[in-house]
Every structure is written in structure tokens, then in C-alpha cells.
Image: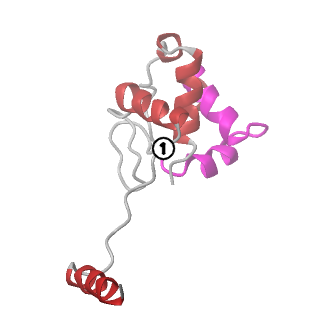
Amino acid sequence: MPVIVGLLLALLAGCGGAAEPPPPTLAPQLAAGQRVFVTHCGACHSTSADTVIVGPSLAGIATRGGQRIDGLDARAYVYSSVLQPSDHLVEGFDDLMPQDLAKKLTGEELDAVVAYVLTLQ
């Protein structure tokens, strides 16, 4: 048995050391939110902090969103930004967000995409 363990260790060492762990699997609501984001939001909003497509990047929105409007935490800010996009324009960006996006989403889809964007680092 010690020979087998030694062979396995040697085999693993020969494979280049420790491999990168796979990315974590998203919870079902977050996975659904990611799909909604890709379908409805990703053409204009980046998930990378240093990338601007058309609208502001949503990376870190859970931190920034809670500081944008007095009385709104990050979750309320994101919901409000989808439901009434013209109410919370980010400086330097035009009012290009679709005004009817919330009407195109089910309540479940809206909840899912809000939950997803609040996880973006």
C-alpha cells in the first residue's frame, strides 16, 4: 500500500503541482441572475471594474450602490435603477438604460439579476 501512495504522489507531482481549483458553482438563483444579466444587461454593463462598455461597470455595485443615494441600501438602489433608470444616472453616463426593462422581466428574473449583480466584486 505505501508503494501505491508513493506512486500517486509522484504522479501528482509530475503533473505540474497544484492545479487551479474550478470556479465555484453558482447557487440556482445566482445562475438564473447571471443568465438574465447576459441576456439583458451584459451588452451595456461590464462585470469588470476597469471596463466600460456603454453604461457603468457593475463590479463592486454592492459597495458603491449603498453610497449613491441617501436612504437606499445597495439592494434598493439596484432595484430602483432597473425599475426607474432615469432617476439615478451615474455622472458621465447618458440616460440610455431601457425604460421598459423591468416590464420585460418577471419578478423572479428581477430578483435573480439583482442578487447576481450584488455578488460582483
Q: Residue furthest front?
A: 1
Q: Nearer the viewer, residue 45 or 8?
A: 8
Q: Nearer the viewer, residue 102 or 24?
A: 24
Q: Measuring from the top left, give residue 3's x and y in whole percent.
A: 29, 89
Does the image show residue 90?
no
- Colour scheme in use: secondary structure
Residue type at the position of mark 1:
Leu
User: Residue 119 appears at what percent x and percent y?
Assistant: 55, 47
Residue appearing at x 69%, y 33% in the figure: 76
Q: Residue at x 62, y 28 (%)?
A: 79
| Vertical comparison of 114 with 23: above or below | above
Q: Disc 1 marks which residue? A: 26
The part of the image, by quadrant, that contains residue 84 is top right
Q: Residue at x 73, y 40 (%)?
A: 73
Viewer-nearest residue: 115 or 70 = 115
Q: Position of residue 2 (x, y in %)?
A: 36, 89
The answer to whether residue 106 is seen in the rendering is yes
Quadrant occupied by the N terminus: bottom left
What secondary structure is found at the residue carrying circle 1?
A: loop
Above or below, 62 relative to 6: above
Image vertical order of residue 78 relative to residue 61, above or below:
above
Q: Is residue 24 magenta?
A: no
Q: Which residues are magenta?
A: 59-85
Magenta span main SS: helix
The residue located at (46%, 36%) in the rendering is: 31
Q: Can you give x and y, in whole percent of width and height, for residue 27 in the image?
A: 53, 40
What is the total number of numbered labels drawn onto the structure image?
A: 1
Outermost residue, right direction? Answer: 71
Instruction: Say if 16 sits above or below 109 in the image.
Output: below
